[in-house]
Every structure is written in structure tokens, then in C-alpha cells.
Amino acid sequence: MVDFAVHGLPLKGIGVKVAAASVDPVASVAALKAGLHVGYPMYAEVDPHAVSAATGAFVHDGDTTYLHATAFLVDPEGRVVNAVYSTGPIGRFTASEVIRKVIFEQQKR
């Protein structure tokens, strides 16, 4: 999340909109958003099993239930052009990867 907050201007400059979602309570997400100075929407209290059913995201069901990191790059027509699914602490989109992919796709048009 920090990476996307830091690179907010370059992302906006190429037309990328960023959003995040969490199973965490509204107050926790709001505090995280404020603490990280995140300038994009962050949604709270999402249903992990509903998100998993809709997207294929992995759910951790244990002492706490949460979604593993999942990211989608969606083109202006609403098609997923790249997806990243994680089952642990590694394997995430970075802002620079998204910037490179978007520029590549824009140059193909």
C-alpha cells in the first residue's frame, strides 16, 4: 500500500486508479489510511469468502480470517490484463511494475 501511495502522482499521470479492500474494521482501515497518507480509496469489512468466490483470492481461515494479497490490473474496458495472487507475505504488484505494464499496453494501441 505504501508503494502505491508514494507513486500516486506517476500512477495518476498515466491514468491509473488505485483502490484497496480489507476485512479489517472500518476504524483500523481509516487509521492505516491516515497513518500511511494513502490518497486512494480503501474499503473495510469486506466479506473474505464473497471476495474469494468472485475473484479467486485465497482466504486464510484460522484464528483470524483474512484475504491474502490479490491484485488486478484492469483496462479501461473493464478487462483484467494482469492478476497477482499471493498465499503468503511475498508476491505483490509494485507500483513500478504497474506503470511499466500500463505504458506497454498504451503503446500497443
Image (cartoon, rainbow, N blue to C red):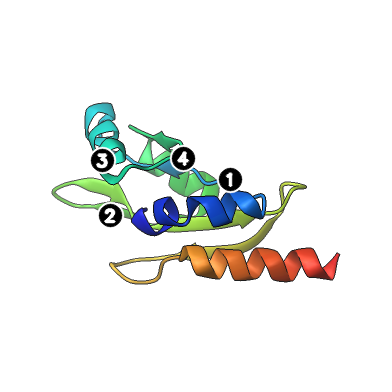
Which is more N-terminal, label 1 or label 3?
1
- Report the amino acid beneath label 2: His
Question: Closer to the camera, 102 or 80?
Answer: 102
The quadrant of the picture occupied by the C terminus is: bottom right
At a point 69% along the width and 66% down the height, the residue shown is 103
SS class of the residue under badge 2?
A: strand
Q: CA distance from mark 4 to mark 2?
A: 25 Å
Question: Closer to the camera, 37 or 102?
Answer: 37
Would you call the spot at circle 4 few (<14 residues within 10 Å), some (14-19), or many (20 or more)? some
Q: CA distance from mark 3 to mark 1?
A: 19 Å
Q: Which residue is mark 2?
A: 60
Any mark on residue 17, and which?
1
Which is more N-terminal, label 2 or label 1?
1
Residue mark closest to the camera, 3 vs 2: 3
Residue 99 falls left or right of residue 47:
right
How far across and how far down the image is residue 77, in percent? 77, 47
At a point 23% along the width and 34% down the height, the residue shown is 31
Which residue is outermost to the right? 109
Query: Does residue 47 sit above or below 104 in this rendering?
Result: above
Q: Which residue is mark 3?
A: 32
Residue 43 falls left or right of residue 31:
right
- Report the amino acid beneath label 3: Leu
Residue 99 falls left or right of residue 106:
left
Residue contact at pointers 3 and 2, CB within 8 angstroms: no
Residue mark closest to the camera, 1 vs 2: 1
Q: CA distance from mark 1 to mark 4?
A: 8 Å
At a point 28% along the width and 54% down the height, the residue shown is 60
